[in-house]
Amino acid sequence: MAELENPGVMPKLIAFLSSLLERVSESNDLTGRVTTQSQSVSVFHGLSRPPITIQSYLERIFKYANCSSSCFVVAYVYLDRFTQRQPLLPINSFNVHRLLITSVMVAAKFLDDLYYNNAYYAKVGGISTKEMNLLELDFLFGLGFDLNVTPNTFHAYFSYLQKEMTLLQPLSLLVGPPRSVITFNDDEATHQKQLAV
């Protein structure tokens, strides 16, 4: 999409995605304390919360990964699919960074003609190559190897992100009421609303 090539769009997209993932991970952190027995620990979970913010981490990935801008929209699609297929592994502050680096790397490998290897993405993400390899494998199995994103699905997710980015007020990135987040099924005909705090 030509809109993604506009230099002003990516900072807004990164800010919105990071805000969305921050709200989701904080909400799941709170509900996870209540229902710890229903959540699983996976290779994506760190022993502690990373000190880098989600926005700084996404900006770092954008700066060093040199992947196409479309990869970030497709990574968002992959994260949505992953959470739908793996309900016992919700996005939280212990796994969001690893899920992000993995989803962007997988999107770059699937979409782009030229992309960096796992060792490079591991350095960008601040993890070992061995861990990056394990994350990629677990992520692919978690997605059921469903990597294809149709043009209609891409457009639906990008349109949603674009609409939300235009509605953002400067302070609403930091605080704001819970919003409905639309997740789209792969048949493009139906979609569901979910609350993402």
Image (spheres, rainbow, N blue to C red):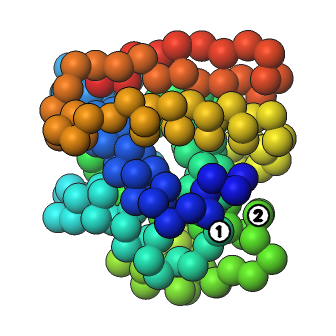
Mark number displayed over residue 111? 2
Crowding at dot 1, Cα within 10 Å, few <14 / some 14-19 / many 20+, comes out as some
Observer able to see residue 125: no
Residue located at (58% from left, 24% from top): 183
Tell me if label 1 and label 2 are in contact, CB under 8 Å.
yes
Mark number displayed over residue 68? 1
Residue located at (52% from left, 13% from top): 193
Place of residue 100 in the rendered image (x, y in percent of width and height, measured from the top left): 46, 57
Of the numbered discs 1 and 2, the one sitting upstream in the chain is: 1
Q: Please count the marks in the image.
A: 2
Q: Secondary structure at mark 1?
A: loop
Query: What amino acid is found at the position of numbered circle 2 in the picture?
Result: Leu
Residue located at (82% from left, 47% from top): 148
Above or below 137: residue 78: above
Asked if residue 9 lies left or right of residue 12, the reply is right
Quarter of image, res 113:
bottom right
Observer able to see residue 126: yes
Above or below 43: residue 17: above
Above or below 147: residue 28: above
Quarter of image, res 40:
top left
Give the foreground label among 1 and 2. Answer: 1
